[in-house]
């Protein structure tokens, strides 16, 4: 890794940056260096006109007919297909839905129900805080002996035991960028009969995933214009080729597969 020692070096690298031309597509206050895109993304210049059209034409003029006339019904899939290109998923396999917390509550509830005899939800201390809050809230809501067990990230593998029903892990640590070994953890969990839920909120663009996704629920963590995030129950198979190329890996149109 090249270490930047001074401003001159940084400016030189900026000039060679192939993405530098993309800056003109966004509205940034003059002279500002903005480093909080992970929380609230910079406004794209195309967003204003698009929002005005949605309000003035699709809402004000077309009203309820917009569900069909302007394709509102299909927006979760349309946007999902755009996200699929970013994360290496097959067309038709990504759906934009609720926030990560709402999606996680639904997915975790379903997973716990499928392994109801096992009372432990396993996670790690590097997980995103709101994910842990969701798991804590679910166990309190169920009030039937389920509990959340939190271990250090490096101890996740050894903590996956027969009494664990669901392993709930975030792939990339939002603070340190540390990554879990998704393949090893998923294999270990399945060996022990556990279901696995991966939060991929900080994974897109971080590195190429060794897996092909067949069931992902798209959402955003917080704010608008943020890099898309995903909460996904793991139904993963080793990647055998370029993303989205193999027809055998694609779910039937209109019918995304459920997580295993």
Image (tube, rainbow, N blue to C red):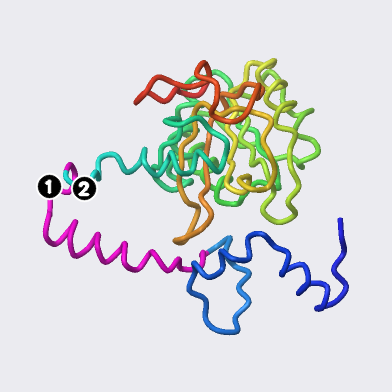
Q: Which mark is residue 233?
A: none
Query: Residue pushed farthest bottom?
Result: 31
Q: Dot 2: what SS? A: loop
Q: Residues within 10 Å of mark 1 (few under 14, many from 20)?
A: few
Q: Residues within 10 Å of mark 2 (few under 14, many from 20)?
A: some
**52 in magenta:** yes
Q: Is residue 104 above or below residue 239?
A: below
**129 in magenta:** no
Question: Which is more toward the observer, 219 or 125?
Answer: 219
The image quarter in which residue 141 lies: top left
The image quarter in which residue 36 lies: bottom right
Residue name at image x 51 percent, y 26 percent: 214
Foreground mark, 2 or 1, reads: 2
Q: Position of residue 223 (x, y in %)?
A: 46, 61
Q: Dot 1: what SS? A: helix
Q: CA distance from mark 2 to mark 1?
A: 8 Å
User: Left or right: where does residue 169 sit relative to residue 247?
Assistant: right
Residue name at image x 40 percent, y 19 percent: 252
Q: Position of residue 40 (x, y in %)?
A: 51, 65
Q: Which mark is residue 70?
A: 2
Residue name at image x 73 percent, y 51 percent: 177
Q: Position of residue 67 (x, y in %)?
A: 19, 44
Magenta residues, start to end: 40-68
Q: Reading the chain from its start, which is encountered first: label 2 or label 1?
A: 1
Q: Which residue is mark 1?
A: 65
Quarter of the picture containing the N terminus is bottom right
């Amino acid at each position: 890794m090249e270490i930047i020692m001074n401003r001159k070096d940084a400016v030189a690298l900026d000039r060679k940056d192939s993405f530098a031309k993309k800056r003109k597509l966004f509205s940034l206050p003059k002279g500002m260096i903005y480093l909080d895109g992970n929380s609230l993304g910079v406004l794209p210049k195309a967003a204003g006109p698009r929002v005005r059209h949605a309000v003035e034409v699709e809402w004000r003029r077309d009203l309820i007919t917009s569900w069909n006339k302007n394709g509102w019904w299909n927006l979760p899939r349309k946007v999902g297909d755009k996200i699929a290109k970013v994360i290496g998923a097959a067309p038709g396999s990504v759906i934009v839905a609720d926030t990560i917390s709402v999606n996680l509550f639904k997915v975790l509830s379903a997973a716990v129900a499928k392994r109801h005899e096992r009372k432990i939800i396993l996670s790690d201390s590097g997980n995103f805080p709101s994910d842990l809050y969701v798991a804590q809230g679910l166990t309190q809501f169920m009030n039937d002996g389920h509990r959340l067990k939190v271990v250090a990230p490096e101890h996740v593998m050894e903590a996956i035991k027969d009494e664990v029903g669901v392993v709930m892990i975030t792939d990339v640590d939002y603070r340190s960028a540390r990554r879990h070994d998704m393949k090893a953890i998923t294999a270990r969990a399945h060996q022990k009969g556990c279901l696995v839920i991966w939060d991929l909120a900080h994974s897109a663009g971080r590195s190429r995933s060794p897996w092909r996704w067949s069931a992902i629920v798209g959402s955003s963590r917080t704010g608008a214009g943020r890099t898309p995030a995903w909460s996904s129950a793991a139904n993963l198979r080793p990647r055998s080729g370029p993303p989205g190329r193999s027809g055998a890996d694609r779910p039937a149109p209109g019918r995304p597969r459920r997580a295993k």
